Amino acid sequence: MSSEIIVIGAGSVGANVAFRLAQRGARVTVLEAGVPGGGTSGASFAWVNAFRKTPRPYYEVNVASMEEHRLLAEELSALTGVSGWYRRTGGLHWEEDDSEQVILRETAERLESWGYPIELITPRAAMELEPDLVVGPMVRDVVHTPTEGYVEMVRLIAALLAGAGHFGAKVRTGVRVTGMLREGDRITGVETANGERLHADTVIDCAGPAADEVMKMAGCEMPFNRVPGRTVYTNPIATTLTRPIHGPGAHWRPDGSGRIMLAHGNHDVGWYEGTPWTPEDSLAVVAGHLRSAAGARVEATRVGVRPMPKDEKPIMGGLPGLDGFYVAVSHSGVTLGPLWGRIVTAEILDGTPDPRVATFRADRFLS
């Protein structure tokens, strides 16, 4: 007899979880308050990487999920006929400030010692890889990360949900969960905003920045932050850019039809915290390092609210003393989504705890 499972949220994590569960024969219903990919996932820089992911257990799951992205691209393309969302282009990183160059070099050395594919190349070699770049003369080394890349996240979510549908999953949009059904210490389903009561063997919280609200419905509060970040999109420009770039003060990548997606500093978080830079200011920083961006204009901006457990690490698994409820929430949900799909499915359907997420259990906040 197959399990009846409700997945709350159709972003990167929820769509991956739904696909793998349905593939294994579970009867899956996805409940999305808005539209698939319409939240944080659709506003993400969508860089697939493990570059600054510490400590080691967090790094390891990110590396494992990078490989899952490669495998998933092949699998979903064959199943759905949808392809082209995953770009394993490699990445480039450099700094101009002396102290920042030292930190970047230390990061590269740590990654190399952990087995991450990485190269230190000259600025000239970087500009040969990406002819539109301008790397200043004060830069000693550029870090090349050949296994990194990016995804077109909304397109990937569409493919994941189509794949889940192939195995019988139902996706319901515009359905907001407002409460949990329970019998004693077990969650038995959900109640929606229109009063509908839906029963399930397991409810999975993949609600991203609203994950803590869903946990409260189940009777558990977690230390949780929400971190808004702004991404900026240019008009189409004549550029040869092919990969994510992390340069001084900004990061940017191609976004289709000649557009550039970019963020100033640390995901433009400073904009939210009160630093008075405009999207045009962010673009100007990038234009100083990307010659084809000269004369570009801002076409659009998006704000994504990143789910951030208080220690900035994932929450994976059940809640102590409560059956029938599972949480899968993390920053870096784009990179980690494919691995979370595998792990959640095995833990729920096979009852097999995955040692890779042992340090990310909810009980670390409850002890």
Image (cartoon, rainbow, N blue to C red):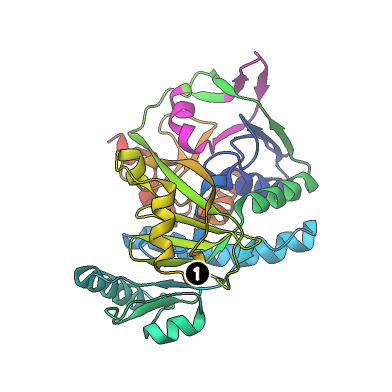
**x and y percentages locating residue 239 in the rendered image:** 57, 70
- Which residue is nearer to you in this view: 308 or 229? 229
Residue found at the far left of this picture: 99
Please tell me which residue is depicted at 48% across the width and 65% down the height of the picture: 294
Could you tell me if residue 50 is visible in this image? Answer: no
Q: Is residue 214 magenta?
A: yes
**x and y percentages locating residue 335 in the rendered image:** 51, 57
**x and y percentages locating residue 224 in the rendered image:** 36, 35
Could you tell me if residue 259 is visible in this image? Answer: yes
Q: Is residue 245 magenta?
A: no
Residue 126 horizontal side relative to residue 272, left or right: right
Please tell me which residue is depicted at 69% across the width and 50% down the height of the picture: 160
Quadrant of the image containing the C terminus: top left
Quadrant of the image containing the N terminus: top right
- Which residue is nearer to you in this view: 349 or 265? 265
Residue 231 horizontal side relative to residue 102, left or right: right
- Which residue is nearer to you in this view: 134 or 160? 134
**x and y percentages locating residue 295 in the rendered image:** 50, 61
Residue 75 horizontal side relative to residue 293, left or right: right
Against 102, residue 12 (above or below) is: above
Identify the image quadrant of residue 126.
bottom left
Residue underneath mark 1: 148
Residue 13 horizontal side relative to residue 81, left or right: left
Q: Amino acid at mark 1?
A: Glu
Range drawn in magenta: 188-216
SS for tag 1? Answer: loop
Mark 1, other Cα within 10 Å: few <14 / some 14–19 / many ≥20: many
Please tell me which residue is depicted at 41% across the width and 69% down the height of the picture: 289
Identify the image quadrant of residue 348.
top right
